[in-house]
Each structure stands twice: as structure tokens, then as C-alpha cells.
Amino acid sequence: MPTDPPALRVRGLAKSFGRPAVAGLDLEVRAGEFYALLGPNGAGKTTSLRMVAGLLPPDAGSIEIFGIDARRDPIGAKRITAWVSDEPLVYDKLTPVEYLEFVAGLWSLPGPVAAARAADLIDWLGLAAQAHQRCEGFSKGMRQKVALAGALIHEPRLIILDEPLTGLDAGSARQVKSVLLERVGAGATIIMTTHILEVAERMAERIGVIAAGRLIAEGTLAELHAASGARHGTLEEIFLDLVAGQDLAA
Ligand SMILES: Nc1ncnc2c1ncn2[C@@H]1O[C@H](COP(=O)(O)OP(=O)(O)OP(=O)(O)O)[C@@H](O)[C@H]1O
């Protein structure tokens, strides 16, 4: 019986900026999974995900999104993928409602569908009070929420987020987390980088650890604990142990 393809399958992904940033990354994320990608600063997380999202050409390697070869068919891959950067880009002169209408138009969503989804996202992300104000006066956190709503409006199957909770206050972080969990509940797959280990620990089904452009460990929290030399089972202990081991091996 044929098996469904994974949400993401990356093999031998490489990118160098003079020196290697991503050095032969292999990564597989299952359909419907919430996957957190951790790693020290400069480990290659953002570079890897930018290549997956089609924003940066790889030097080598393959990327498949739900079985679509993203290098051969970038448009097909982008159609089912969302990318949310940690530097949100929204159009200052538009209001959140106008911005969502605009993005929905790019995806050719029927008007009533777009309006219903926009209303839900605005409500879930706590943007109702600003829904008709221009984005130009918004804080970084508010822009981040508008950008997230824009990325989700076409109901992508794979949602890739780079540090989505950085700079959000506790209330906004909770709203974003619950929207993400709602999407996973509805069948989407999420890959998220974070330095907030508690978020990875609580939300992700599996966690991958990248160091020096390679995946050095992967699994559930229990599996990572077993693979590390950490005595205690907190993700912080495990992460620091795994990364320290990598430094010695380098
Ligand atoms: N456009 C670029 N030009 C030159 N070097 C780059 C560029 N983008 C990334 N790099 C380098 O590639 C390496 C990996 O960077 P990347 O941003 O992918 O790491 P990261 O794991 O996301 O780090 P952080 O946790 O600090 O965001 C770093 O050494 C970085 O300086």
C-alpha cells in the first residue's frame, strides 16, 4: 500500500556564504506534526528554512514538500506552504482587514471564504480593535500577528515559522500558540524555530537540534533525553548537553 509522503523531506541540503551555513542537512517532518527546530545562534536554522520556503537557492540537496519537489516545482510547493519570518513584512498603508483581503486575492480565494477566514483570524489573534486601522502605527508584535494571519489565510498544509513568539507579550504569545495548535488540530503541519525551550517542550511532538548546519539530534523529549548525557530531563539540560557534545566533536 502506498504511504503518504511526509510534509517535508530534506536531503543533503547545503548552503555556504563563504563558509558553510547549512552543511548537508537531512530532515523529515511527518504530516500533521508539530516540529520544533532548536539550535544555537548561527546554527543554520533560518538559512535552512528559507531554502525550504523557496526564498534562498540551495547550493545542493533536495527538498520535497508533501511529495512535491520544491526545487523543480517551486510554485506548486509554495501554494501549500506558509512562511512567517521573525521580521514581519506587512503593507503599512493597509489595515489588517485590507491586508488579508489583498493576500486572499493573491491566492484567488472566493470573497466569502476569505472574509470568513479573515474574521476568524482577526478574532483569534486579538486584532479586532485594530482591524480597521492602518498597520503603520502598529507595534512589532501586532505586525507579527497580522503577518501570521496573512500567512494562514490560504490554509497552507505546511506552516514554517521562524521565532514566531519573539517580542510578543504573554497575551499575544498565548493567542499565537492557540492559533497554531488549532491549525495542527485541523490537520496542518508546523515547523517552528524557537529559542524558548519551554515552548518547544510544551508544544512540539518532536524536536530537532541543529548545530553547525547539521541535525545532531531528533526525537520526542524522552528520546532526546535518552540520547543525551543530561542527568535531568528538562529540555534546557538536554539541549545544552547535546550542543556542548557537538562543540567537543567539532
Ligand atoms: N545572507 C547571509 N550572508 C552571509 N552570511 C549569512 C547570511 N545568512 C546567514 N548567514 C550566516 O549563516 C550562518 C547561519 O545563520 P542562520 O541565520 O541560519 O542561523 P540561525 O540558526 O537561524 O541563528 P539564530 O538563532 O541566531 O537566528 C551564520 O554564520 C550567519 O552569519
Image (cartoon, rainbow, N blue to C red):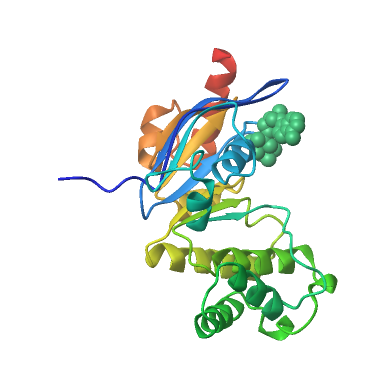
> In the displayed image of the protein, which residue is found farthest to the left?
1
Instruction: Tell me which corner region of the image, top left, top right, bottom left or bottom right, holds residue 64.
Output: top left
| Front one among 97 and 148 | 97
Q: Position of residue 201 (x, y in %)?
A: 48, 49
> In the displayed image of the protein, which residue is found farthest to the top?
249
Relative vertical location of residue 112 with respect to residue 106 in this rendering, above or below: below
Q: Which corner quadrant of the figure contains ligand 1?
A: top right
Answer yes or no: is residue 117 visible. yes
Q: Position of residue 230 (x, y in %)?
A: 46, 30
Relative vertical location of residue 120 with respect to residue 74 in this rendering, above or below: below
Instruction: Tell me which corner region of the image, top left, top right, bottom left or bottom right, holds residue 145.
Output: bottom right
Q: Position of residue 18 (x, y in %)?
A: 73, 20
What residue lies at 54% left-to-right and 79% top-to-bottom? 114
| Front one among 220 and 62 | 62
Image quadrant containing the C terminus: top right
What residue lies at 73% left-to-right and 82% top-to-bottom? 130
Answer yes or no: is residue 231 visible. no
What residue lies at 69% left-to-right and 73% top-to-bottom? 99
Instruction: Tell me which corner region of the image, top left, top right, bottom left or bottom right, holds residue 22.
Output: top right
What residue lies at 62% left-to-right and 33% top-to-bottom? 44
| Front one among 18 and 250 | 18
Image quadrant containing the N terminus: top left
